[in-house]
């Protein structure tokens, strides 16, 4: 058994300087810590499939701890999408999670992977580094205690893995829930989904997804599709939010819209925006001004045709 565990710090996006301070505190608190091999990567959701971050993570075959600014369920399945697989470990930040997939069991529809545990810690659960450091210490001590009865050697300095990233937006499939009903494949008109060699649904062309469109997550009967950076916890991967939570939209207060209707409206708006951008003359593309929340709500109400 190894005498240390890789700890992956997935930093906040550059547009979140309020989180950079905690990232720095974690680096300071984990550098040289016994039993810890610290590796610092950009935001895990933004890593390119063939970039240095994913190329570093894939060969790791033993247990690991991943600290990210996402729900643990989202982090786990983002890693799975990149071929970094295992079983989801139980951490204090996962308190209250539904047992799906079970903490110590592989997801039934996930491809085979190493028999190892991946602990995912949600950095948003705390406003300071100390609770996260305590949780990491608990995991490391429990995992390595049998192999190091006389104490662990000092840890190494942090390994910084550099990668130029951009904010990405793509669906992440939870294969612990997915029933392979193919509703997402039939619904999406942007060519995001496909089937792998075993006829299992996959996000084959993730970057074909239209930024801001979560429509396929709404129509998934099992609630298996996540967009980790979406504002709605049920869509972002909060396991405490049931599949029914995907139907809880403010516009329902005005008419009880079917979630499929909402999803169709979101998909159609994304298609219209895509077509508008393609029709703009070269060199004259401009970014439309962001709508405020009230404008967005009015648009959704209009789409309901009440």
Image (cartoon, grey):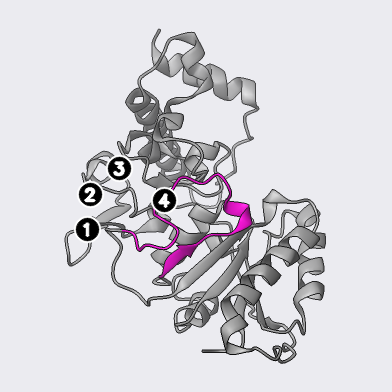
Q: Residue at x 33, y 55 (%)?
A: 175
**Foreground: disc 3 or disc 2:** 2
- Label 2 to label 4, Cα distance in Å? 15 Å
Of callouts 1 and 2, which one flags the residue occurring earlier in the amino acid sequence? 2
Give the image location of residue 116, x and y in percent: 43, 75
Q: Residue at x 79, y 56 (%)?
A: 17
- Label 1 to label 3, Cα distance in Å? 16 Å
Of callouts 3 and 2, which one flags the residue occurring earlier in the amino acid sequence? 2
Q: Nearer the viewer, residue 104 or 156?
A: 104
User: How many numbered circles does the render carry?
Assistant: 4
List the residue tagged with mark 4. 171
Q: Specify whether 152 is left or right of 21.
A: left
Where 209 sits versus 221, above or below? below
Where 300 sits versus 110, above or below? above
List the residue tagged with mark 1. 200
Where 55 sits versus 12, above or below? below
- SS of the residue at dot 2? loop
- Are circles 2 and 4 on residues that touch, CB within 8 Å? no
- The secondary structure that dominates the magenta segment is loop
The quadrant in which the C terminus is found is top left
Q: Specify whether 37 is left or right of 268.
A: right
Q: Residues within 10 Å of mark 3 (few under 14, many from 20)?
A: some
**Foreground: disc 1 or disc 4:** 1
List the residue tagged with mark 2. 180
Q: Residues within 10 Å of mark 2 (few under 14, many from 20)?
A: some
**Foreground: disc 2 or disc 4:** 2
Residue 9 makes an appearance in the image: yes
Of callouts 3 and 4, which one flags the residue occurring earlier in the amino acid sequence? 4
Dividing the picture into quadrants, the one containing residue 181 is: top left
**Foreground: disc 1 or disc 3:** 1
């Amino acid at each position: 058994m190894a005498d240390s565990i890789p700890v992956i710090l997935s930093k906040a996006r550059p547009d979140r300087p309020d989180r950079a301070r905690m990232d720095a505190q974690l680096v300071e608190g984990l550098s040289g810590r016994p039993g810890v091999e610290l590796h610092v990567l950009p935001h895990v959701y933004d890593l390119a499939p063939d970039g240095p971050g994913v190329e570093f993570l894939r060969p790791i075959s033993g247990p690991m701890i991943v600290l990210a600014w996402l729900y643990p369920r989202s982090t786990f399945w983002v890693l799975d999408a990149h071929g970094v697989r295992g079983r989801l470990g139980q951490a204090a930040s996962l308190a209250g999670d539904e047992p799906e997939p079970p903490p110590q069991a592989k997801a039934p529809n996930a491809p085979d992977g190493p028999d190892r545990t991946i602990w995912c810690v949600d950095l948003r659960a705390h406003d300071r580094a100390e609770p996260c450091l305590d949780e990491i210490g608990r995991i490391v001590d429990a995992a390595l205690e049998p192999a190091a009865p006389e104490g662990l050697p000092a840890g190494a300095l942090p390994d910084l893995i550099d990668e130029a990233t951009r904010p990405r937006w793509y669906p992440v499939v939870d294969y612990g829930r997915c029933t392979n009903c193919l509703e997402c494949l039939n619904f999406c008109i942007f060519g995001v989904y496909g089937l792998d060699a075993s006829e299992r649904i996959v996000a084959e062309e993730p970057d074909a997804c239209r930024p801001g469109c979560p429509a396929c997550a709404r129509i998934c009967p099992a609630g298996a599709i996540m967009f980790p950076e979406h504002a709605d916890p049920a869509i972002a991967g909060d396991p405490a939010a049931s599949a029914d939570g995907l139907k809880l939209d403010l516009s329902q207060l005005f008419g009880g819209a079917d979630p499929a209707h909402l999803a169709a409206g979101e998909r159609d708006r994304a298609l219209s925006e895509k077509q508008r951008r393609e029709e703009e003359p070269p060199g004259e593309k401009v970014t439309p001004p962001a709508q405020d929340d009230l404008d967005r709500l009015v648009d959704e109400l209009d789409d309901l045709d009440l």
